[in-house]
Every structure is written in C-alpha cells, then in structure tokens.
Image (tube, rainbow, N blue to C red):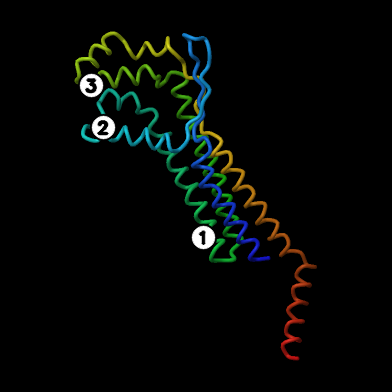
Amino acid sequence: MKAVYRVVSALLAALIFPAMYFLNLIHYIIELKITEGYLNDNIVLQEIINIVTDFFKKTSHKPMGAHLTEVLMPLKASAIVTAVFIVLTVLMALAVIFCSAFTNARKVNLCFAVGGIISTIGAMAAFNHMTSLIINGTVSVSSVINAAMSDSSSFLAGVGALLGAGGATEYLGKLLLLRLGSAFTATVILFSFIVLWTLAFLLIELDPDAKAKKSLRGQNKKLKGQN
C-alpha cells in the first residue's frame, strides 16, 4: 500500500507540469467596438515564452523609459507577488514528487500539497488584482502605449504620441477580462486530489482495526520465520 500511495502521489504532482504547459495559462475577453463583437481567447505557455523572449531581445540593449516605468509602477507589487506564488506552486509540486519518490513522509506530503493549493490560489488572486488595475483604468492600455511612444526617440513614435495613437485603442477595443486560465484551476484540483489521497491513508493508519491487523500480520511473519 505504501508503494501505491507514493506512485499515485508522485504521478498527480507530475501531472501539474503538462497541465501548465498544454492548458490555457491566461484567459482574456476584449470588446471589439468596430465590429461590435468580442474576442474571447486564451494564451498558452509557449506563446507567453515567445512574447517575453521577443520583448527582451528588442529591449535588452536599452532601459525602460521613465514614462513607461511610471505608468507601470502600480502593477509592480501585484506582478511580483504573482510571480512569487507561481514559483512556490512549482516548488510545492516538485517537493511532493521527491517526497513521494524517496520517503514515506505522508504528513510532509500533505503540508506540501496544502501549500501548493494556497500558493496557486494566491497567484490567481494577485493576478486578478493586477489586471483589475488595467480594466478599471488605473493603468489603461492607452496610457501604456502613450508612455512607450513618449519614451521612444523615433520620428514615427513621436508623431504617434502627438496624434494620441494610444488613445485610439479605446475606440478599437476594450479589455473586459484578463485572468489566469484553466492551467491553474487544474493545478488546484490536482493538489486537492493529493490532499484527499494522503488524508485517506492517514485515516487508515489511525484506524485501530487496521493497526491490529497490521500487528497480527507482523506476528504471523515472525512465527513463519521461526518455523
């Protein structure tokens, strides 16, 4: 039974990583004012990696401008908290895998799984707080675009800022929803299964009848060994 518990616990924790990779990481809804429709779509991890990689390739040789830094400042704390919670979620999953593979410490596994649930929910809450600042206009998309153009030294960017190209986004579309997607929901579910699975085994160990049967089996083995 110990082997079964360890294998299932490790497998459930390992499933978190393909869930993060293949399932939707971010879900968004944009109201398209020109077509009077909605863009309801998702972003997976590979797309985020490509976006971040391209961003750093284009901006690695120059620092972020003062205007853009000032506009994005309200998002900084929530972004950092979100990143920290996501890292903790990954660490909790790895901890469950290693603990299941190399030890029988079920109570420790339980603590790691509960910690994974808390960190995942914390990441979702922090991300929602960050995006609420964008949706309610505290840090609007148009202000970000205008700030980026103001910091650019190119002639076309200067003309765009002068004409208010950032403000034009309010007429083209409006962000209605931006949140962490089904990958994080699946992560919470998988950690919850680990918690229930572990509690089931801990309750079995507390059962006096189960302890008596285990003790009897041990005595029978000793008697067989003596014979």
Residue at image x 54%, y 61%? 99
Q: Earlier in the sequence, mark 2 or mark 1?
A: 2
Q: Distance between the residues labelled 3 and 2?
A: 11 Å
Residue 166, compared with residue 225, is above or below; it is above
Badge 2 amino acid: Thr
Image-based side of 163 in relation to 6, left or right: left
Q: Name the residue under label 2.
A: 59
Instruction: Name the residue located 54 percent from the left edge and 39 percent from the top edge.
Output: 184
In the rendered structure, which disc, 3 or 2, sits on the residue that comes first in sequence? 2
Q: How crowded is mark 1: few (under 14 residues within 10 Å), some or many (20 or more)?
A: some
Label 1 residue SS: helix
Residue 226 screen position, x and y as percent: 73, 90
Q: Quadrant of the N terminus?
A: bottom right
Lateral position of residue 128 relative to residue 168, left or right:
right
User: Marks 1 and 3: in contact by CB < 8 Å?
Assistant: no
Query: Could you say which is closer to the camera, residue 199 or residue 159?
Result: 159
> Circle 2 — which element?
helix
Who's the residue at 43% across and 43% down the image? 84
Residue 172 in picture, x, y percent from top left:
43, 12
**Where is mark 3, residue-wise?**
152
**Residue tagged 1:** 98
- Residue 51: image tag: none
First of labels 3, 1 by sequence position: 1
Farthest right residue?
209
Q: In this view, does 129 lie to the left or right of 154?
A: right
The quarter of the displayed image where residue 138 is located: top left
